[in-house]
Amino acid sequence: MASSLILPDQQTIHRMVSRYPEIDVPSVEACLAFLDTSTAFYNAVDNYLAHYRLSRGKFTLLMQLVEADENGLLPSEFAERAGVTRASVTSLLDGLERDKLIVRQPHPIDRRMLTIHMTDKGRELMNTILPQHFVWIKEWMENLSHREQQTLIELLAKLRSGIDLSEKL
């Protein structure tokens, strides 16, 4: 189980301004609140998935397969959709295959490639997990009106558009 973030309080942030005049206190406070909320969300998801011996990474791959057609997906498609390396996907797929939740099959046209398909056991697991998963998402978001939820989506998209690590590093 992941632990909570230990975040600096407002007084600590204000004391740091004398050493680091670049600090914009409202920006730091907003960022810390976002990180704290993200951590709480991830902890809740991790705890739920742990009951099914799944990590977020494995769950993400299974979610991609829930709606995949009978042709399955290529490992490279998982990597591209999840924004991770092919090596990471391979490791996750190995675990899912070991648990008999997915199966690798030769590509129907190019025998050098493999396609990934969910097994009946995998579909059964996802049919067990997803109803409660979606109930909890609804419960987590019910403190916000539908309009506030839409505003949150817009604000997060706006925040994300300002983050380009390739230019910041």
Image: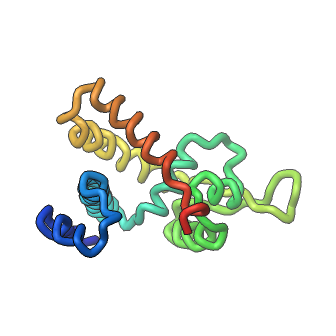
| Furthest residue toward left | 11
Residue 2 sits above or below residue 65 on the image: below
Q: Is residue 39 left or right of residue 89?
A: left
- Could you tell me which quadrant the C terminus lies in? bottom right
Which one is nearer the viewer's eye here, 144 or 90? 144
Which residue is pictured at 70% across the width and 59% down the height?
Answer: 76
Is residue 28 at least partly visible in the picture? yes
Which one is nearer the viewer's eye here, 49 or 98? 49
Which one is nearer the viewer's eye here, 144 or 24? 24
Which residue is pictured at 40% across the width and 64% down the height?
Answer: 54
Which residue is pictured at 59% across the width and 58% down the height?
Answer: 83
Which residue is pictured at 49% across the width and 49% down the height?
Answer: 162
Q: Residue 136, percent across and down?
A: 25, 44
- Could you tell me which quadrant the N terminus lies in? bottom left
Residue 58 sits above or below residue 64 on the image: below
Q: Residue 146, percent across and down?
A: 28, 25
Is residue 48 at least partly visible in the picture? no
Q: How many marks?
A: 0
Q: Residue 133, percent across and down?
A: 32, 46
Q: Is residue 93 left or right of residue 152?
A: right
| Furthest residue toward top | 147
Residue 106 sits above or below residue 147 on the image: below
Q: Is residue 129 left or right of residue 67?
A: left
Q: Residue 19, percent across and down?
A: 26, 75
